[in-house]
Amino acid sequence: MTRVKICGITNLEDALAAADAGADALGFVLAEEAKERNRYISLEDAQTIIEKLPPFVTTVAVTVNMPVTEIAQVLNWFDLVQLHGEEEPYHLPLGHLGIKAFRAGPDMGIAEMDEYREARAWLLDAFVPDQRGGTGKVCDWELAKQAVGMNKPIILAGGLTPENVGEAVSRVQPYGVDVSGGVESSPGKKDHERIRTFINNVHEAPVAQRQR
């Protein structure tokens, strides 16, 4: 079954609604540039929400060029950390706890992803110049499909919505999908019905043999 991460969580109500709808993971954006879209959350506020989550919901800290020492501190609270900047491979001293994000653009080669082989998974987002995610632009699904063949769990992000996620899962066959703006009612606030529909459409999409 394709896993689902609901990202850009900023409040407890949305976190609990996503968990209740069957989300496998919740993403909390600690990078201050997310303030532009009202998706930023402080570490302290994220901790308050995490303390109230039910068990078996994976928590993911989304970071951008965070120093390794700070990443270690963040992992005291989060299950995984998602590196969404220009981090070098040495940023993965605890590779099994790291997800490396890539922007699937015209200058990106699949081979360069292999430098981050120690990461727990690779996330492919859309390429938008000077922006690192949350743009609402659709990722290059063909490039993502090629990445699926590299024997590493692939998480597909970028412009996913309840309306197109079924097709995305069928075409790319990713390990998981990641959505933020596609299930919002307004910037930083989730539409709970769209979350439920999104997860339902993921689960109903035809899939081949799953990545392990």
Image (cartoon, rainbow, N blue to C red):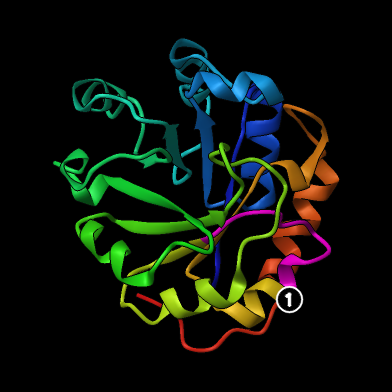
Look at the image and say whether residue 164 sits in the magenta stretch: yes
Circle 1 SS class: helix
Which residue: 61% across, 72% down?
141
Of the pair 28 and 22, the residue shown nearer to us:
28
Taking depth in this image into account, of 146 and 204 the one nearest to the observer is 146
Q: Is residue 149 magenta?
A: no
Of the 4 image quadrants, the one containing the C terminus is bottom left
Q: Amino acid at mark 1?
A: Glu
Q: Which residue is mark 1?
A: 167
Q: Which residues are magenta?
A: 156-166
Query: At which x and y percent is residue 15?
Result: 63, 33
Residue at position x 52%, y 29% in the image:
29
Q: Quadrant of residue 192?
A: top right
Q: Residue 196: image x %, image y %?
A: 77, 52
Q: Give the residue drawn at x 45%, y 56%.
A: 123
- Going by the picture, which residue comes out furthest to the front? 107
In the displayed structure, 151 sits above or below 126; it is below
Determine whether 176 is above or below 40 in the image: below
- Left or right: residue 188 compared with residue 6: right
Query: What secondary structure do most residues of the magenta stretch adopt?
Result: loop
Asked if 179 appears above or below 48 in the picture, the reply is below
